[in-house]
Amino acid sequence: MASWDDLPLDVLDLVVAGLPNPADRARCRAVCRTWHSAVRRRGPQAQQLPWIVLWDGEVIAPPNDRLERLASIPDKASCKASSNDWLLLSTYQQILEDGEQTYRYCNYVLHNVFTLESIPLPELGAALHRAYYVRKFLMRSTIHDFIAIITTNENTPFIVILPGKGVWLPEPRSAPYIYIVDIAFLGDKLYGITKAENLIPFDLGLDEDGSPMVTIGRRVIRQPLDYEGYEWWPVSDDENSDLESDDDDDDDDDDDDDDEEEEKEEEEVAVDDNDDEEEEEVALANIAIVANAEQPTEALNVLLDDYDENGHEVENDDDDGRININFNSCPHDNIADDLIIIWHLVESQGKLLMVKPRMYTPLDLSPQSIRRVEVFQADLNTGKWVPMANDLGSGQALFISRRFSKSISAPCGDVAEGDIYFIESGEVFNIKAQLSNLKRFRKPFYQGTYGMWLFPSDLVL
């Protein structure tokens, strides 16, 4: 009896060409290697553009420039952030308080729209007050490794989770965590950037009880105090922070207390990584199992519905999401009434890049547009940001958003070397051509609509 992978290629190409729905194309790729190759060869992913997902589960999948609802995401789910091919979902409730509509977020779940795999993340729901939300989440490698999260709550501005092992939280309102506006992994180490453009390393490991722990390293890049009007933390916070003086910092000319760095010397227990071949076998098995599931959406509903009708009770539940909001972690600032600057940190070819677009934001709330883009590389040896005026490094392009940013190999399909795609304005900026060749790859969103990049497995390198 012939199998599905024996289908003639010309017939298979016709099948793929007739699949406009992104979820259908994802399931098609999971059938077998032959079908996976056909989607890559004939499907929209040949253009090598990632998907764009909105908070309500609608998606733009190239080459279509129209919104389609992802069938695997329930109506009650809210897409909070993305990381490679994974979405962070939560349930949300609309609550009327003092005549104003507010939201409550509960029951976080990691969901892969391509494999239809869903993993509950109860540690996040227990740590983050349900009136606040996630600004960004980032996985170090796989869903079984460390996950770093930036939130809007100044009491828990920075969260590190190791699924199944526990959660690590800093002291409420403590520096430097409340000042981190973006994060990126470089190898096993996590880095955070502030609006003052200080670059701070964090070592992630396990304590003696096997729970996640975070150790602050010596600042890789330190800007002068009050750099461009930003202090990386106030004196009062520095005196109470958990940083200790660094013995290697004696040659620094600045003796101010708030310019001292402490480096904790604690033994860390490394996370055991699974064998690569075993991980690949498990991943393929999961794809096969989930792809043949009859009711993936209903299964996800079960995970999202696992709470009482009023949501879990939390301390200070009268908090409306504004009392303890952390404005310091907002990744942008106004530099004029209609102009903002945004800070992004992204790893590219083993290097850390800081991308700083200046974006025109009309007061009438019409679509935004890029006015200027600056890109810097972190020189970890000299402790300085080095301008990158003409290229991003050999054969690279960047996809930038507040929720998730990523570097991919280029040229590839429609993506040219040196391209920087900005999700908010829908524009492509090429670092070589600068503003002379600024173009739109899609219609821009309205202001305040923050989409997120989602990378099919073909683009996750």
Image (cartoon, rainbow, N blue to C red):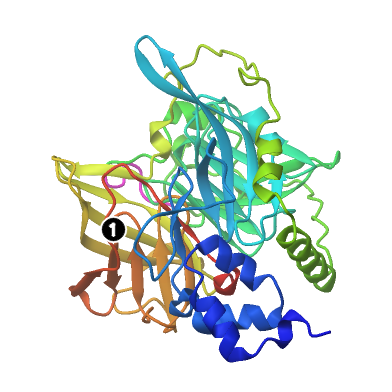
Is 187 drawn above or below residue 349 in the view shown?
A: above
Instruction: Assess disc 1: are there few (<14), some (14-19) or many (≥20) residues with their C-alpha within 10 Å of its C-alpha.
Output: many
> Could you tell me residue 202's position as x and y percent?
61, 50
Label 1, secondary structure: give it: strand
| Count of labels in the image | 1
Question: Is residue 200 at all visible to an observer of this figure?
Answer: no
Left/right placement of residue 197 relative to residue 352 reads: left
Q: Residue at x 38, y 20 (%)?
A: 101
Is 460 drawn above or below residue 149 in the view shown?
A: below
Image quadrant in which you'd find residue 169: top right
Quadrant location, the C terminus: bottom right
Q: Residue at x 43, y 26 (%)?
A: 325
Three-letter amino acid code at the position of disc 1? Pro
Is 79 drawn above or below residue 378 in the view shown?
A: above
Q: What residue is pinned by disc 1? A: 357
Image quadrant in which you'd find residue 106: top right
Asked whether 224 falls inside the magenta stretch, the response is yes
Question: Is residue 217 at all visible to an observer of this figure?
Answer: yes
Q: Residue at x 35, y 66 (%)?
A: 421
Is 78 drawn above or below residue 437 in the view shown?
A: above
> Could you tell me residue 61's position as x and y percent?
44, 64
> Could you tell me residue 34's position as x and y percent?
67, 83
Left/right placement of residue 253 relative to residue 90 reads: left
Residue 197 vs residue 66, the one in the foreground: 66
Quadrant location, the N terminus: bottom right
Q: Single out the residue that lies furthest toward the front.
A: 1
The residues colored magenta run: 222-228
> Could you tell me residue 22's position as x and y percent?
51, 63
Q: State whether the magenta stretch is mostly helix, strand or loop.
A: loop
Q: Single out the residue that lies furthest toward the top.
A: 98
